[in-house]
Image (tube, rainbow, N blue to C red):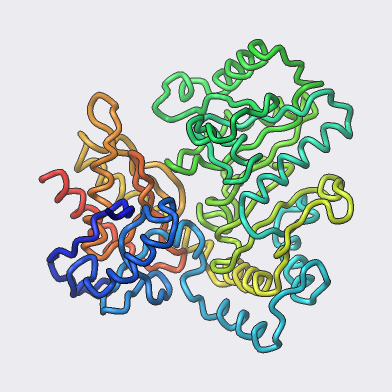
Amino acid sequence: MSNWRFNLTPIDVPKVETKYRKITTKLPVPESLEILETLDHFEAKTMLGQMPVVWDRAEGFQVHDAWGNTWIDFTSTIFVANAGHGNPKIVNALREQLDKPLLHTYNFASKIRADYLRYLIESTPPQFEKACLFVAGTEATEAALRLMRMHGWKIGKKQPGVIAFEGCFHGETLGARMMSYNPKAKEWIGYHDPHIYHLPFPYPWRMDAIADPRAYFRSGMSKLIKQNQLNPKEDLCGFILETYQGWGAAFYPEEFVHELMDFAHENGMLVAFDEMQSGFGRTGKLFGYMHYGVEPDLLCCGKGASSSMPLSMILGKQEILDLPEFGEMYSTHSANPLACAAGLANLHELMEGGLLENSRLLGDLFHSRLNLIKNHFPEQIRCVLGKGLVAAVHFVDQDGRPLVDLCNRICLEAMRRGLLVVHTGRESIKLAPPLCINEEALMEGLDALEQAIAECIGK
C-alpha cells in the first residue's frame, strides 16, 4: 500500500498545450512510477504529501518533467524560488564558486561571506546592524527565542517568558515547535515549556478582532497575564509573530500590531518577526512586516533569501546579536560559500532587477482576479487573503465548516491542467508564483485554477 497522499494510478487527462503549459501524458506519468515507488519504499511518509509530479528541471516560473509536461508554478517550491527557478545570475554565481572550487568553509572567513553580509546589511533597514547566517528557518527562530531570553536576563527579567500566537508555525526543532501552536503536533515532546505562551490570533472572521484590533490585543493579554499570574515587566522577554499566518496568508490588523509594539516597549520586551514565507519581496515589499509600519527588534528569514540554496538568518541590532559568546550560535553549514553566493545574487536581483516592483504591481492584479473567482463560488470560498504575490483561498461551507477534501481535489485537478499550487492539507489552497512571472502567465494560471474549482464543484 502506497504512503503517497495522492493516488499513483495513471489516468487519462485532457491534453493541454498553451503558451505556458503542456500536458501530453497520463498523470501521474506511467514512466515516473518507478521513481515515485522508490521514494515510497525508502523515504519517510512525511515527505510524500504533494502532487505526484517528478520534477526534471525548472526555469523561471515553469516546472518541467522528463516526459514532455510543463506546469506553471504557483508554489515557488514553498516560497523559496522568489527570483525564479534557475535564475541565470544565481546559476552564474554558483558556477563561479564551484569553479574556484570553494564549497565549504565552516566558520573560517571567505570573501563571498563578507561581500554578502555587507550587501545584506546595507540593503536592509538601519535597525538591522548585524546578521547571523544559518541553513534552515527553524534555526533562525530558535535563535530568536534564545536572543529574546538572553536579552531578558541581561536587563534583569526574572522569568524567560515568550509570547507567540494561536495557529502559528515556527519550525521543526524543539524550541520552534514549542513556539508553534498546534498542540497535537507537540504531543511527542512530552512536556511544554511553561514560559512559552500563546495569544488568540485576530482572524478576519472574528468580528471582535476586526471591530477593535487594539482592544482585542489588550483583552487577550489581560487574560493571559491573569491566568498565568505574570508581571510583564519581570516575566516576559518578547513576542514572536509570523508576519502573516503561514497556512492561510492571514495578516494581522495594523492597529493590532501597533498595540503589541507599544506593550512590548512599555515592558522591556523584544519583538521578533518570522519572515520565512513573507521575506525577500514576496508581499510586494522587501519584508512583509513593512506593511505594518513598525520596526521589529529581530527578523528571522529563510526560504526566499537565496531562491535556491539552504540559507536562513536572523538580523538585529549589534547589542542583541552579539549576546552569545564565540561559538554559541551557529551551525556546521552556516555561511556556506555556495549559499552566500546565491544569497548575494538573489538580493541583487530583488533590489536591482525589478522583481520587488513586479511583485507589487502584479500582486494587485493577482488579488483582484482571485476575488472575482471568489465571487463566482460564494458558497465555497469564504475569503482570499494575502498581499503581493502570495494568496490563500479559504474554502468553507455555509456553516463555516472547512472543506478540506474539496481543496485536495482542486489541487489535484489543477495539476492535471498544468498548474502547481501549494497543498496545505487544510481548508486553504496557497498560491505563490515566482516574482519573475509575467502578467500573461499569471492570468493563464488563474484561468486554470478557476477551471479546476469549477470542475470539482460541478459548475
Q: Locate residue 259: give its quadrant.
A: top right
Which residue sits at x=73%, y=29%? 264
Near-viewer residue (34 or 131) = 34
Which residue sits at x=33%, y=66%? 36
- Which quadrant would the C terminus be assigned to in this image? top left
Q: Where is residue 121 in the image (x, y as percent from the top left)?
A: 75, 60
Q: How many marks?
A: 0
Q: Position of residue 399 (x, y in %)?
A: 25, 24
Near-viewer residue (341 or 369) = 341
Which residue sits at x=56%, y=54%? 285
Q: Is residue 67 above or below residue 387?
A: below
- Residue 207 vs residue 122: left or right? left
Q: Where is residue 392 in the image (x, y as percent from the top left)?
A: 38, 45
Q: Is residue 235 above or below residue 422?
A: above
Q: Position of residue 192 (x, y in %)?
A: 63, 28
Which residue sits at x=62%, y=72%? 342
